[in-house]
Image (cartoon, rainbow, N blue to C red):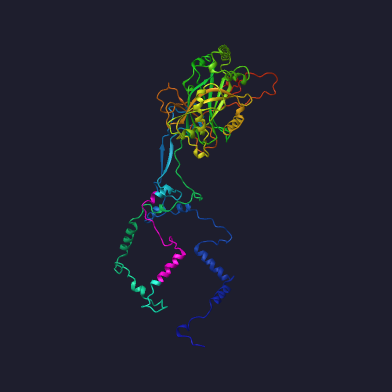
């Protein structure tokens, strides 16, 4: 056995495994180990915690309150403390777009109702966070900003970006080997001893001031200056923004709440003329969505009768207020689509007989035959005068028609003129106004070009169009519901024989359709309040028509609106014995059971 050297004679030759085995056997379950643990626990003033018991996490807020930071926390104190000037509350006055407020006076109200009313009148309390953009939830990196920041930056090209082709790379390596070998200076096959490359290589440039003694502070200052030179002002913002599909919460700053408006459309009713003029005819407009099967606006009633026809109703109709004389309306459409129709309904004074019998004279008499049928027309005027004297307060359905709104918008937008005149004929007919039919062929052909998809449904940039509706459908007595109307509107979008079975009534309605201006003059809200920029109260106004959105609109209700729309749908007398004529419906607001408790609601 070899002798051990002098420095290794005192080294223990015990193996580590034997040491671990000896220690584990010495303290395994011994009272000495428990005694040592109890001594350590008493010194640290902590009780023993069972390994199976869950420990509650530290309450950070409570710890910060009980352990206040020292006055001087060093240069990084701003990163630890909450900025005292981060939150600022600014009170902004609420803007009222009408001349008079729609909110009622607070004189006689319950305290609860008064507090609810004040939510529509009090100023906005806007919380401004100065350092919101520095938070992790705020992401200012949009695609446009990224392109703007990257302008003027040099393109960085790295070796890893230039992946060499396999064949070219091998050729370059073989070429280098051939150039680095010299038969005169290096023996054949002695690549390790070749000095050809060393002879032809250039020396590296010397590093200036490499061996000079420079203080550390000076080196840090020079490094700091070099980092700041030619540095982009938003270095970290150059990093591309994460994918929008990633589940990261974005804390966007909300806008000040305001009244919601969709895409606004201005409709002006110019004239309404029939082949014969024997009685007053009343018209209304409304928007319908065929796909959703919903009425998406309230009714807009307008009167285009002559003064002679209005005189027949003077005993029953009081002097009209200026708010009821509107002939132009602004419709709002939040969800424009290819399924929106502008439906025009006509009504006449209630008279005895079926709807078909009442509409028969308008379908058989022509304007050119007025002289030949003078006696018959005089008799019809006399009967209409009697019905107006007796039943001038009541109306009955007469005729209807519809305009595919997006066809008009797309056709008007595709033309190069400033304005468009299009004649719309909803059914085949022969007779009056035949001189205009040739010019209407071009208009009808242009309306056949429909767009697909909701992206093309833009109601803010099309050219104004003047429409001439030449035909109306006679209202069927057994098809008065909205469900029947939706079926007809669906048939108008595709060739169908259903509409051909309906008998048309010859008429001529002229209307203008154009994008609504941002701040129209002489405008009334749905509550008949004057919108600002209303210079003269005697001018015929423009009505804003309240929208009934086809789908939910997630905006806060910031406008006080006290309106109730009642549309009687149907009245069934199938089980009633005897006749049931001249049925009227009366709606009253009651604050008690007694008939005298009717509220004067207009």
The vertical placement of 207 against 349, above or below, is below
For image coordinates 61% across by 20% down, the residue present is 584
Task: Please state which of residues 415 and 339 is positioned toward the viewer in this rendering.
Answer: 415
Quadrant in which residue 363 is drawn: top right
Q: Kindly tell me whether residue 558 is visible in this rendering.
A: no
Task: Please state which of residues 596 and 306 is positioned toward the viewer in this rendering.
Answer: 306
Position of residue 190 measured from the top left corner of the image (x, y, whole percent): 41, 78
Q: Residue 16: say if magenta.
A: no
The vertical placement of 139 against 55, above or below, is above
Task: Please state which of residues 490 and 539 is positioned toward the viewer in this rendering.
Answer: 490
- For the image shown, how many numbered marks are present on the structure? 0
Position of residue 179 measured from the top left corner of the image (x, y, whole percent): 38, 71
The segment highlighted magenta reads 148-177
Position of residue 131 measured from the top left corner of the image (x, y, whole percent): 40, 47
For image coordinates 48% across by 36% down, the residue present is 458
Position of residue 81 measured from the top left corner of the image (x, y, whole percent): 41, 52
Task: Please state which of residues 600 and 559 is positioned toward the viewer in this rendering.
Answer: 559
């Amino acid at each position: 056995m070899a002798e051990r050297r002098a420095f290794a004679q005192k080294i223990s030759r015990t193996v580590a495994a034997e040491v671990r085995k000896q220690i584990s056997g010495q303290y395994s379950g011994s009272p000495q180990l428990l005694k040592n643990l109890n001594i350590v626990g008493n010194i640290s003033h902590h009780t023993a915690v069972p390994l199976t018991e869950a420990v509650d996490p530290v309450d950070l807020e409570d710890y910060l309150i009980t352990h206040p930071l020292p006055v001087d926390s060093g240069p990084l104190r701003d990163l630890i403390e909450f900025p005292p000037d981060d939150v600022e509350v600014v009170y902004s006055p609420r803007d009222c777009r009408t001349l008079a407020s729609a909110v009622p006076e607070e004189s006689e109200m319950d305290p609860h109702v008064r507090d609810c009313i004040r939510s529509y009148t009090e100023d906005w309390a806007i919380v401004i966070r100065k350092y919101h953009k520095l938070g992790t939830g705020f992401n200012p990196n949009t695609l446009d900003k990224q392109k703007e920041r990257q302008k003027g930056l040099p393109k960085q090209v790295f070796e890893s970006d230039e992946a060499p082709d396999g064949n070219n790379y091998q050729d370059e390596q073989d070429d280098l080997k051939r150039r680095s070998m010299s038969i005169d200076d290096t023996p054949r096959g002695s690549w390790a001893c070749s000095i050809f490359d060393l002879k032809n290589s250039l020396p590296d440039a010397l590093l200036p001031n490499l061996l000079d003694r420079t203080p550390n502070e000076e080196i840090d200052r020079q490094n700091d200056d070099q980092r700041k030179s030619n540095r982009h002002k938003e270095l970290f913002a150059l990093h591309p923004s994460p994918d929008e599909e990633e589940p990261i919460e974005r804390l966007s700053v909300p806008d000040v709440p305001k009244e919601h408006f969709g895409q606004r459309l201005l409709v002006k009713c110019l004239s309404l003329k029939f082949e014969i003029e024997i009685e007053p005819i009343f018209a209304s407009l409304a928007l319908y969505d065929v796909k959703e099967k919903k009425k998406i606006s309230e009714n807009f009633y307008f009167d285009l009768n002559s003064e002679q026809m209005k005189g027949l109703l003077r005993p029953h109709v009081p002097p009209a207020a200026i708010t009821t004389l509107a002939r132009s309306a602004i419709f709002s459409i939040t969800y424009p689509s290819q399924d929106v129709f502008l439906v025009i309904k006509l009504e006449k004074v209630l008279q005895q007989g079926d709807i078909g019998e009442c509409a028969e004279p308008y379908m058989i008499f022509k304007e050119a035959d007025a002289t030949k049928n003078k006696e018959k027309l005089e008799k019809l005027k006399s009967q209409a005068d009697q019905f107006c004297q007796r039943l001038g307060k009541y109306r009955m359905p007469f005729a209807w028609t519809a305009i595919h709104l997006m066809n008009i918008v797309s056709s008007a937008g595709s033309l190069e003129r400033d304005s468009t005149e299009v004649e719309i004929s909803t059914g085949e007919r022969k007779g009056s106004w035949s001189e205009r039919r040739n010019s209407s062929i071009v208009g009808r052909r242009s309306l056949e070009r429909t767009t697909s998809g909701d992206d093309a449904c833009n109601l803010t940039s099309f050219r104004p169009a003047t429409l001439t509706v030449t035909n109306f459908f006679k209202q069927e007595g057994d098809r008065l519901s909205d469900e029947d109307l939706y079926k007809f509107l669906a048939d108008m979008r595709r060739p169908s024989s259903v509409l051909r079975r309906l008998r048309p009534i010859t008429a001529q309605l002229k209307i203008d359709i154009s994008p609504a201006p941002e701040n129209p003059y002489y405008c009334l809200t749905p509550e008949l309040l004057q919108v600002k920029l209303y210079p003269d109260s005697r001018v015929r106004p423009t009505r804003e028509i309240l929208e009934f959105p086809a789908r939910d609109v997630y905006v806060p209700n910031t406008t006080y609106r006290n309106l109730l729309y009642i549309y009687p749908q149907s009245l069934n007398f199938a089980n009633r014995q005897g006749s049931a004529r001249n049925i009227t419906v009366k709606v009253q607001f009651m604050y008690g059971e007694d008939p005298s408790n009717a509220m004067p609601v207009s």
